[in-house]
């Protein structure tokens, strides 16, 4: 793999994996700076870093999927070759299917005609046997010895072909492709990765039952499960909060109370109390950053309305 200096000199674009490593490092750095800004009460810097981290999270999400697709290209050569061979075998199976179906159709028609004739004869024999026995019952005639009536042709056919029909029915079910996440907001790379994961899970769990080819099973085992690591957003990286938004008039009091504290204890803080105090400071800073962001949005809306009124007067 070429170094970054070589790629810069040749104009070669970095891979998605290289971009992912760089963005992950930037995210870690931004998260560390955000923690420091929150602890110091710098809510303006906190607001900027929260926006930056949000952008990095979205970029990492897309790059993770793109890197997984790039990684899959290493085994695509084997997959394409196997697909070509399987496609040829599929064509041969379709070609052999037509004469087999025609033979089965003729055999079925002959069997149906024979079964119909046999059933007609059997029904006549059954009617005659009934007439003989009902005559004997009505007129108290002794029962005549007759050969037993065999099993009906329908029952014989069910016994004869039942097992074969059941086995053929199990083999005649077309296996559907596995479902995958197809949300419209997914990027093409994300959709491709979701398909890759669904296909791998289906082959891993159902491959033996479906009696898939050993070559396909071996290729899937060689490639392994596609990596799909979602970046879990830690607390510093969460943009916004569900807590009630304080009034801008309360910001100075909140900020001062968070940084300086009210009536601080002369005793040294325990580690638990210190951690809780730092978390309170961070939480207050995040609230103040949210107020700042909301105030900035309000100013933009007010400026747009003012410009609109001026345009109307003009």
Image: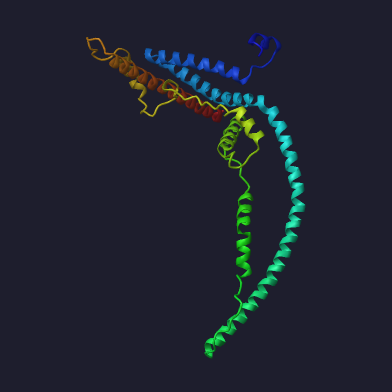
Where residue 36 appears, as percent x and y from the top left, is 41, 13
Residue at the outermost front position: 145
Q: Is residue 282 left or right of residue 2?
A: left
Q: Is the C terminus in the top left, top right, bottom left or bottom right quadrant?
A: top right
Above or below, 266 against 303 in this view is: above
Where residue 312 appears, as percent x and y from the top left, is 55, 31
Q: Which quarter of the figure has residue 264? A: top left
Name the residue nearer the viewer: 256 or 34. 34
Instruction: Name the residue: 61% across, 63% down.
Output: 158
Colouring scheme, one of rainbow, by chain, secondary structure, one colour: rainbow
Q: Is residue 255 left or right of residue 96?
A: left
Instruction: Name the residue: 62% across, 65% down.
Output: 156
Kindly tell me whether residue 201 is visible in this rendering. yes
Number of numbered labels in the structure image: 0
Instruction: Name the residue: 39% across, 21% down.
Output: 286
Where residue 157 appears, as percent x and y from the top left, is 63, 64
Where residue 63 appears, as percent x and y from the top left, is 58, 23
Above or below, 243 against 152 in this view is: above
Residue at the outermost bottom position: 139
Name the residue nearer the viewer: 108 or 181. 108
Above or below, 232 against 273 in this view is: below
Kindly tell me whether residue 187 is visible in this rendering. no
Name the residue nearer the viewer: 275 or 117. 117
Q: Is the N terminus in the top left, top right, bottom left or bottom right quadrant?
A: top right
Instruction: Name the residue: 71% across, 61% down.
Output: 108
Name the residue nearer the viewer: 174 or 296. 174
Above or below, 230 against 136 in this view is: above
Q: Is residue 267 left or right of residue 246?
A: left
């Amino acid at each position: 793999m070429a170094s970054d200096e070589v790629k810069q000199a040749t104009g070669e674009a970095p891979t998605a994996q290289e971009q992912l490593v760089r963005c992950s490092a930037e995210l870690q750095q931004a998260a560390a700076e955000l923690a420091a800004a929150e602890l110091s009460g710098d809510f303006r810097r906190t607001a900027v870093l929260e926006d930056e981290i949000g952008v990095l999270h979205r970029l990492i999400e897309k790059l993770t999927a793109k890197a997984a697709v790039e990684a899959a290209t290493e085994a695509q050569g084997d997959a394409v070759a196997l697909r070509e061979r399987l496609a040829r075998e599929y064509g041969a199976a379709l070609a052999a299917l037509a004469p087999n179906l025609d033979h089965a159709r003729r055999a079925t028609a002959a069997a149906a005609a024979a079964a119909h004739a046999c059933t007609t004869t059997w029904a006549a024999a059954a009617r005659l046997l009934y007439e003989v026995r009902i005559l004997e019952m009505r007129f108290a005639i002794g029962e005549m010895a007759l050969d037993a009536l065999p099993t009906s042709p329908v029952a014989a056919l069910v016994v004869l072909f039942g097992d074969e029909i059941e086995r053929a029915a199990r083999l005649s079910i077309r296996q559907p492709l596995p479902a995958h996440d197809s949300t419209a907001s997914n990027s093409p790379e994300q959709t491709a990765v979701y398909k890759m994961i669904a296909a791998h899970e289906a082959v891993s769990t159902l491959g033996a039952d479906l009696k898939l080819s050993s070559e396909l099973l071996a290729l899937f085992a060689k490639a392994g499960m596609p990596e799909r690591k979602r970046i879990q957003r830690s607390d510093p990286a969460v943009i916004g909060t569900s807590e009630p938004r304080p009034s801008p008039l309360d910001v100075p009091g909140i900020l001062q109370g968070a940084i300086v504290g009210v009536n601080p204890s002369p005793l040294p803080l325990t580690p638990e109390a210190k951690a809780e105090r730092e978390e309170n400071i961070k939480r207050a800073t995040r609230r103040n950053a949210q107020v700042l962001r909301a105030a900035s949005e309000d100013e933009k809306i007010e400026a747009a309305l003012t410009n609109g009124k001026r345009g109307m007067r003009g």
